[in-house]
Amino acid sequence: MDTLPVNIPGFVWAYRFSPDEKKAVRLNNSATVADLTADNCFYWLHLNLVDARVPALLETLDGLTEDAKSALTTHDTHAALTVDEQMLYGTLVDCQRDFAQDTNNLGWLHFAMSDRFIITTRLQPLRSVERARALIEKNPGKIALPVDLFELLVIEFQRTLIAIVIELTEELNQIEDIVYDNAPRDERRRLAPVRRTVVRLHRHLRTVLALMRRAAAADDDEMPFGFDDVARRLTSRLETVDHDIYALQDRARLLHEEIDSKQSSETNRHLYLLSIMTAFLLPPTLVTGFFGMNTANLPFSVGDYGTEYAVILIVGSVALAWWLLRRVNIL
């Protein structure tokens, strides 16, 4: 672990790429801005926006336009992609990761790219960015241009989405087994977070796809070298995942409808039983109410068998109610 003091504000990591030698050098914490551009290499600088000094640092970096600086320091929570003056900048959606495990919570990666650098900023650690860094450590010769690194970041985002789709599919499989079981159980509380995650992923992925198509159709004079081919490949990859997420969303919706249908059937069954009980108890209630009236000359009020006659009337009224319900095919 690098324990040297940090010279660059918000520094998370930085790599210097040498296309001729096909190698990537990770700079240590004590690296300065001048070390980034040494030997005519291009660099990847990854910054943490929690450090309030990052905007001031960006002012000292060459090649950044005002719009690109604004894109790197924004706190907007929606995807954006802009091609301008041989630069590509904006915001990409990603999934967060904490110290112990990856999560499905959405995070935002802000970036600016030219032919000499790619700068990324974020507030929370992100899954795809960390995986891209690990791949660079394993195979540094894979990155020849900044656009290759941008493509790697988006590819790792696609792989993150695939992992989430597999995880949510397994969760839906378990819910589905319970929903279609004979024993009634309400799985709406368990299904709700799955639907929320799928809907959010689908919404943001559709936005990224639309932005990628729009950027690929930009004027060639404005576009970074090689980005048109990269945009077409990334669009094809993301469309495949988008189809999977859409199918997952449709499946979750059908499961929710099935749960609602079973709950409605169960409620109707309870209402049916309640109606039957009401029909059985209504005649005895009428009998007991009649004998409970505070009036004179009630039947069976004189003699030794009044209670027995009242019981017989109650039983007879229940039997009559049962016969009527059978007659009209309610029972």
Image (cartoon, rainbow, N blue to C red):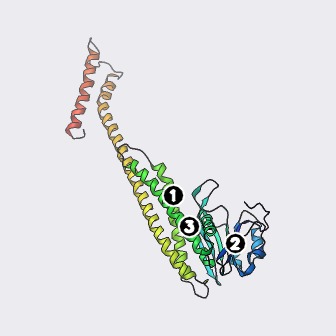
Asked whether, in this view, residue 109 is left or right of residue 269, the answer is: right
Which of label 2 and label 1 is nearer to you? 2
The amino acid at mark 1 is Arg
Which of label 1 and label 3 is nearer to you? 3
**Quadrant location, the C terminus:** top left
Tag on residue 157? Answer: 3
Where residue 252 appears, x then y in whole percent? 43, 57
Q: How many marks?
A: 3
Residue at (36% x, 44% y) in the render: 266
Give the SS element for disc 2.
strand
How far, Cα to Cα, is label 1 from label 3? 19 Å
Tag on residue 25? Answer: 2
Give the SS element for disc 3.
helix
Question: For mark 1, what is the residue?
Answer: 196
Image quadrant where residue 73 sits: bottom right
From what the image shows, is residue 308 above or below residue 66? Answer: above
From what the image shows, is residue 267 above or below residue 78? Answer: above
Give the SS element for disc 1.
helix
Report if the CB atoms under discs 2 and 1 are less than 8 Å apart.
no
The amino acid at mark 2 is Val
Asked whether, in this view, residue 302 is left or right of residue 129, the answer is: left
Say if residue 62 shows up in the picture.
no
Dot 2, how many residues are within 10 Å of its Cα: few (below 14), some (14-19), or many (20+)? Answer: some
Residue at (50% x, 63% y) in the render: 162
